[in-house]
Amino acid sequence: MKTLVLNGSPKKNGTVAKLLKSIVTDLETKETLDWVNVYDLNLKPCIGCMKCRDTLVCCLPEDNAHKMATLINNVDNLIIGTPTYWGNMSAQLKMLLERVVPVFMGESAKGIPIPKQKGKKAIIVTACTTPYPFNFILAESRGAVNSVKEILKYGGYKIIGKLVKPGSKNNSKINSRLINKAHKLGSKI
C-alpha cells in the first residue's frame, strides 16, 4: 500500500503538518509513504482551456503538476491537509488540484463525471484560527473540508475521516483527543 500526504500549508512544521504527522506515525513502518509540501512545488495556474478533458493530461508546459498527477495516480491512499483561508483550502493546494483534474475524473460523452480513483481511501485535515464552534457555524473549517471533499468525491475516493483543529491562533497545541483521533484515522488506512 502506498500513501501520499499533501501538506497544503506554507508552514512545514505548523499545525496542519503536525496533524498530518500524527496520522502517519504508524504508517511509516508498514507501507510506502510520500510526503509533499505543496508550497515547495513549482506550479503554473490552470488556464481553463479544458484541453485536458480530451487529452487526459494538462497541456501546460511540464512542471511539478505533471509529476504530482503521476504520483497521485499511483498511490492507494491520499491524505490532504490545508489551513483554512476564508472558509476554503489554501491557494497553492487549490492550484495543484485544479491542474490534476484528469487524474481525479474523466467525463462521459454526455459530460457526466466519471471517478478515476474509485476505491482509494482519503483523509482530510484542516486547521483554523476561528475558535470552536464558530469555525463550523461561520463555515470556516466546514468550508475548507467541503471544498477538499468535493474534489475527492468526484475522484471516487472513500473519505474515511476528517481531522479539524479550531482556534489555532490562540492555542496551537494539539490536544490528546485530536492526537488519538489522528492515530485512529491512520489505523484505518
Image (tube, grey):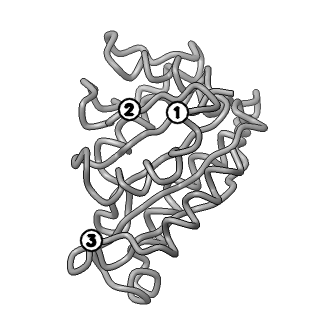
- Image side of residue 30 versus residue 48, left or right: right
Amino acid at dot 2: Val
Q: Which residue is identified by label 2?
A: 36
- Quadrant position of residue 53: top right
* Residue at figure coordinates x 46%, y 82% from the top left: 136
Q: Which of the two labelled residues, at mark 3 and mark 2, occupies the earlier sequence position?
A: 2
- Quadrant position of residue 97: top left
Look at the numbered disc 2 and give the secondary structure of its residue: strand
Quadrant where the image shows the N terminus: top right
Specify few, some or many for label 1: CA neighbours under 10 Å numbering under 14, 14-19, or 20 or more: many
Q: Which residue is identified by label 3?
A: 172
How far apart marks 2 and 1 lie (CA) works out to: 8 Å
Q: Is residue 167 above or below residue 189?
A: below
Q: Is residue 159 above or below residue 50?
A: below
- Image side of residue 132 versus residue 168, left or right: right
Of discs 1 and 3, which sits in the foreground? 3
Specify few, some or many for label 3: CA neighbours under 10 Å numbering under 14, 14-19, or 20 or more: some
Q: Which residue is identified by label 1?
A: 4
Q: Are marks 2 and 1 in contact (CB under 8 Å)?
A: yes
Amino acid at dot 3: Ser
Q: Which of the two labelled residues, at mark 1 and mark 3, occupies the earlier sequence position?
A: 1
Q: Are marks 3 and 2 in contact (CB under 8 Å)?
A: no
Q: Which of the two labelled residues, at mark 2 and mark 1, occupies the earlier sequence position?
A: 1
Quadrant where the image shows the C terminus: top right
- Image side of residue 36 versus residue 158, left or right: left
* Residue at figure coordinates x 70%, y 36% from the top left: 111
How far apart marks 1 and 3 lie (CA) works out to: 25 Å
Look at the numbered disc 1 and give the secondary structure of its residue: strand
Residue 15, how many percent across, how many down?
A: 31, 60
